[in-house]
Image (cartoon, rainbow, N blue to C red):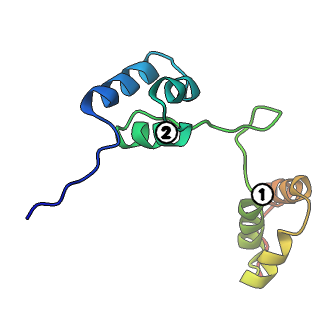
């Protein structure tokens, strides 16, 4: 006894979605054309290996760095415990960045 699997995208639909996306169509317009959600189109394009997620940048055009990454870097330089490093994430992100930059320019502190 074989199991019947529902197909969300026919091979023709898949080809149309991939072709449209690679030719510059937005995910939203593809979703409207196909009668699917944008999330479904993104998932299909991801499975097909053609979807590229948006790269978020700061207002200054730099890559976004999360507070946790700054806190971890500071904790590493200062040899802080995990709980001490965790407490740093409560600080303002710009302050964490400035602390990290100042520490990175100085010699590592031996603790």
Q: Residues within 10 Å of mark 1 (few under 14, many from 20)?
A: few
**Is 31 situated left or right of 80 in this image?**
left
Asked if residue 81 shows in the view, the reply is no
Q: Quadrant of residue 105?
A: bottom right
Q: Earlier in the sequence, mark 2 or mark 1?
A: 2
Q: What residue occupies the far top of the structure in this picture?
A: 23
Circle 1: element type: helix
Of 44 and 62, the residue lying toward us:
44
Element marked by disc 2: helix
Q: In the image, residue 93 lies at what x, y percent?
A: 86, 56
Residue ID for mark 1: 104
- Residue 9 placement: quadrant: top left
Image position of 49 (left or right of 108): left
**Is the residue marked by circle 2 packed among few (<14), some (14-19), or many (20+) residues within 10 Å?**
many
Q: Residue at x 40, y 26 (%)?
A: 17
Q: How many numbered circles does the render carry?
A: 2
In-image side of 22 versus 54 (left or right)? left
Image quarter where the C terminus lies is bottom right
Picture residue at 35% right of the left edge, 42% below the top: 8
Query: Residue at (75%, 72%) from the top-left corner?
Result: 75
Please tell me which residue lies in front, 23 or 87.
23
In the rendered view, tell whether residue 67 sits above or below residue 109: above
Number of the label disc, if any, that sits on residue 84: none
How far separated are the C-alphas under marks 2 and 1?
39 Å
Instruction: Residue 42: give its label.
Output: 2
- Residue 67 appears at what percent x and percent y? 78, 60
63 up-or-down from 77: above or below: above
């Amino acid at each position: 006894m074989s199991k019947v699997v529902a197909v969300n995208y026919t091979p023709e639909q898949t080809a149309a979605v991939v072709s449209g996306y690679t030719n510059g169509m937005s995910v939203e317009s593809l979703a409207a054309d196909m009668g699917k959600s944008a999330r479904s189109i993104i998932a299909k394009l991801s499975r097909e290996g053609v979807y590229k997620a948006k790269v978020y940048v700061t207002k200054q055009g730099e890559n976004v760095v999360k507070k946790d990454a700054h806190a971890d870097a500071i904790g590493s330089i200062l040899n802080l415990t995990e709980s001490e490093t965790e407490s740093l994430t409560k600080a303002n992100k710009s302050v964490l960045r400035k602390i990290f930059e100042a520490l990175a320019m100085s010699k590592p502190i031996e603790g």
